[in-house]
Amino acid sequence: MEIKSNDFSNNSMMPALYTCDGRDISPQLSWSNFPKETKSFALSVIDPDAPRGDFVHWLIYDIPKEENNIPRGGPIPNGTKEAENDFRRMQYGGPCPPSGTHRYFFTIYALDIEHLDDVNKGNFISKVNGHKIDSAQIIGLYSHR
């Protein structure tokens, strides 16, 4: 399985447009080479370098199996749901590290189920891992101006 972005490459600096220093919109993402038995997708964007540990920037799930792209700035595909992130909102929240260069892990998961129930920030990873067939990630880097 593979995930890529037209807006940044793996382990490279993300443009400010997708951060608190810019418009704070989500970058374009697309995925391919997923298992045939995939019934839906989920996506997480997590900063493991935050001072208090993993900082959740975006959690989306129930992405229909027919979808394999999120355009720059959205919208997310019809039927897709979002869970609250660490900004206490549902939508994408871009990088805004307090100091240094942080890594942002954009992870796509292929799931063996169409819909996940009762998903929230606290249980997203365990719910997704309980139905994960495959996954892929791309890492963006950012230093706050």
Image (tube, rainbow, N blue to C red):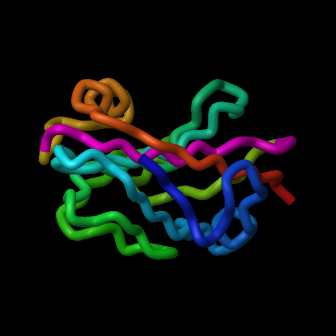
Q: Reply yes or no: does residue 106 show up in magenta.
A: yes
Side (left or right) of 99 relative to 50: right
Task: Kindly identify the residue that appears in the image at 17 percent across and 36 percent down.
Answer: 118
Task: Kindly identify the residue that appears in the image at 82 percent across and 52 percent down.
Answer: 143
Judge by depth and name the residue closer to the eye, 123 or 128. 128
By secondary structure, the bulk of the magenta-drawn segment is best described as: strand
Side (left or right) of 41 relative to 102: left
Q: Establish if 12 lies above or below 88.
A: below
Judge by depth and name the residue closer to the eye, 15 or 98. 15
Judge by depth and name the residue closer to the eye, 80 or 122. 80
Q: Reply yes or no: does residue 118 show up in magenta.
A: no
Magenta residues, start to end: 99-113
Q: Establish if 18 lies above or below 62.
A: below
Q: Quadrant of residue 125?
A: top left
Position of residue 96 measured from the top left corner of the image (x, y, whole percent):
71, 52
Q: Establish if 110 lies above or below 65.
A: above
